[in-house]
Image (cartoon, rainbow, N blue to C red):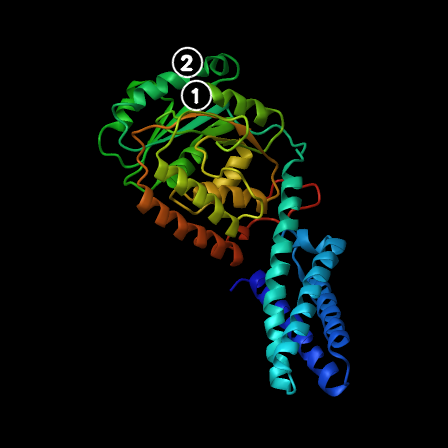
Amino acid sequence: MSGGLRRVVAIGALSTAIDAGGFLLLREVAGWALVPADAAALVSAALASFWLHRMTVAPGDPYERWVDRPAAFARIAAIAGVVDIAVVVGLAHLVDPTTAVTLLAVKVSALIIAGVVRLAGERRLLFRVVRAEQDQRVERAAPPGEVRFSVVVPAYRERDHIGAAVVALRAALEEVSADGGLEIVIIDDGSGDGTAAAARDAGADLVLEQPENRGKGAAVRRGALASHGRAVAFTDADLAYSPDQLLRLLAEVEDGWDVVVGSRRHEDTTTLVRAGRLREVGGRAINLLTQAVLLGQYRDTQCGMKAFRSDVARLLFGRSRVDGFAFDVELFHLAERYRLSLTEVPVSVANSTRSTVRVARDALHLVRDLFRIRRWAKQGRYDEGVAAFPADRELPNH
């Protein structure tokens, strides 16, 4: 268990003990009435929790967003407190607690229900805080790079199509080639069918070969870390998103955004060819599941078109661990964790019938990886070797 997780667990256990123990003492020993005893215990526990978190939270810890807002903390604690008191009073009328054991059972029930309310309130607050942070572009020095724009394309068994994709990318981004330079990076994810050779023949600037099929996340990670552009984007080999849309993402990055993500759920998005019904339902279910990992509530985490400043790309992909399709969710989590600016843009999508996605298998792997991301975050794995954020949100060391 990481230091941060131990701190949260220890403070939670202590504040719960103060709440339940204080309530029993005031009710059974001091003889206070039910409501005043519960209210006093709740206030004592909330003050202890807030003070301990504020004294022990490390700079850069996501929990810092919470303790930096005492008024919001107090509002949510008050709402949860009202729920706690209501449950205590209601259950007391039902079971008539005349012993310390039954009184404690009533209080524990109230703590559980109020705890759910408090967690929901915290999530809602953190959602607003995170998205407000992401909406603020940060003035940074120009990102490093040898060319203006790198486009990373992961490919698996795309021998018959990757050449056309390279040609289409080159044509759509001709103005970038003429003004600052374009780099097309193809990663053959262990295809074994000549995909890499076809990409080289088509004129890709950099072709990397994975020794085995490791997954989209591993392929994009390798390509992004090997790229030389000042801005780095990735898109799918089937070009479900027409390559001219990369110009919009490049413009947003050059306008000061750290991370730019395409969104198929944006109100201005155009769907030219719909995905299969099963994939659509699966995609919506995945977006709901991501709320267990992410603080912000994003309309679409799995869009296959995203762009970054080069230094941000190296930070995020240098810290990412997921090899499969959940790597997109991991990127969002890291952007939240490192307090990067982020904007969503509409896309035009023509879903391909030759996708390599296997819905049932990949959905199971994605759910597994979502829980891994959550576990790694709680263990502090994403903070190892990363300097804490100063107030001006400079990029941490990577």
The x and y percentages for residue 149 are 49, 23
- Between discs 1 and 2, the one toward the N terminus: 2
Q: Residues within 10 Å of mark 2 (few under 14, many from 20)?
A: some
Question: Which disc is residue 243 wearing?
Answer: 1
* Residue in the picture at 76% in, 54% down: 71
Identity of the residue drawn at 28% across and 19% down: 201
Q: Which residue is mark 2?
A: 171
| Image x and y of residue 219, in percent | 37, 37
Element at label 1: helix
Between 238 and 270, the one lying in front of the other is 270
The C terminus - image quarter: top right
The reply to whether residue 293 is visible in this rendering is no
314 shown above or below 82: above
> For mark 1, does the 10 Å Cα neighbourhood hold few (<14), some (14 to 19), or many (20 or more) residues?
many
Q: Are marks 1 and 2 in contact (CB under 8 Å)?
A: yes
User: What's the residue type where badge 2 is placed?
Assistant: Ala
Give the numbered dot on residue 116: none
